[in-house]
Each structure stands twice: as structure tokens, then as C-alpha cells.
Amino acid sequence: MELHLIRHAHAEDTVPDEARRLSPRGRRQARALARRLRATGEFAPAEIWHSTLRRARETAALLAPAAHGAPLREQTGLAPEDDPAAVARRLARTRGPVALVGHEPQLSALASQLVTGTADPVVFHVRKASALALTRVGRRWVVRWFLPPEVGR
């Protein structure tokens, strides 16, 4: 199974947190990330999961065209402070390729959990508008590539 962990793009500094939308800069970042993901030729999720927070939903929507219109699926348990182990268990039951658009610190902890078997210590740092591609090999995950926001600007 293929998995893309993607952190949402830059968001406005408004309150409440769940209503924060992408800033103009964030929309540019998400569109640029979509172009870079399409250029890899390897971004073909069956679904794009995103958190219930607006900025993740907006980022996912801007990435969908690069994923050939993969459906967006709002998922609980993907908020910044949610347990990465719960997401790892859900992914263990998932068969098709998935892109997951989420937040820090959960994404870095999730990547660490999947690759090393533990979320502590955190060995990854998923920055805004970046993507980490993983492949499941047995019960563990292997890093295929990392796409930081600076690549392909």
C-alpha cells in the first residue's frame, strides 16, 4: 500500500483554530505542491483523507486534481493532538493507496510510528505544504521519498 502524508499549507492566524482557512500564500503553496505531486507520476491515491479542520480540507481540495479527482474523505482522529497510533491502526486495515492531509505534531509522530514502530522519539518533521511518501512492507513502512516545500518553486 502507498501512503502520502501531507501537511496542510499556510493558514491565516484567526481564531477559532478549526475555522482557520488557507491564506493566499497557502493557496499558492497547495497549488504548487499539487503540480509537484503530479510531476512525480506516483501520486495516485484512491482517496484523500483530511482532518475536520478547514485548512486541511482546503489543502486536500487543491490537491485533488493532481490525484485525478480522488474523492475527499473527512476523517476524525486527524487533528493536531490526536493519537497517531489510532491512525496507524486504521491504516493497517486499509488496502488502497491513500493521501492523508493533516497537522503537526500528529503527522510527524505518525510517520515516526509507521517507520520506526514508535512515535517517541519523533524522527520526522513534516513541514507545511510538504509530502512524505511511504510504502507498506509487511507490518512496517518504508520511506520512498520526501518532497519539501522548497522543491520545484
Image: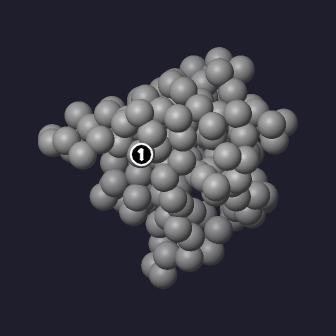
Camera sees residue 110:
no
How many other residues sit within 10 Å of disc 1, few (<14), some (14-19) or many (≥20)? many
Camera sees residue 149:
yes
**Is 40 placed left or right of 76 in the picture?**
right
Percent position (x, y) of residue 57?
Answer: 42, 30
Percent position (x, y) of residue 141?
Answer: 70, 61
**Is 76 placed left or right of 4 in the picture?**
left
Q: Is residue 149 above or below residue 36?
A: below
Judging by the rendered image, the residue that carries numbered circle 1 is: 10
Percent position (x, y) of residue 110?
Answer: 51, 61
Residue at far left of view: 15
Residue 13 or residue 146, whichever sits in front = 13
The residue at 81%/41% (across/down) is 40
Q: Is residue 117 above or below residue 66?
A: below
Residue 67 or residue 110, whichever sits in front = 67
Picture quarter containing residue 148? bottom right
Mark 1: secondary structure? loop
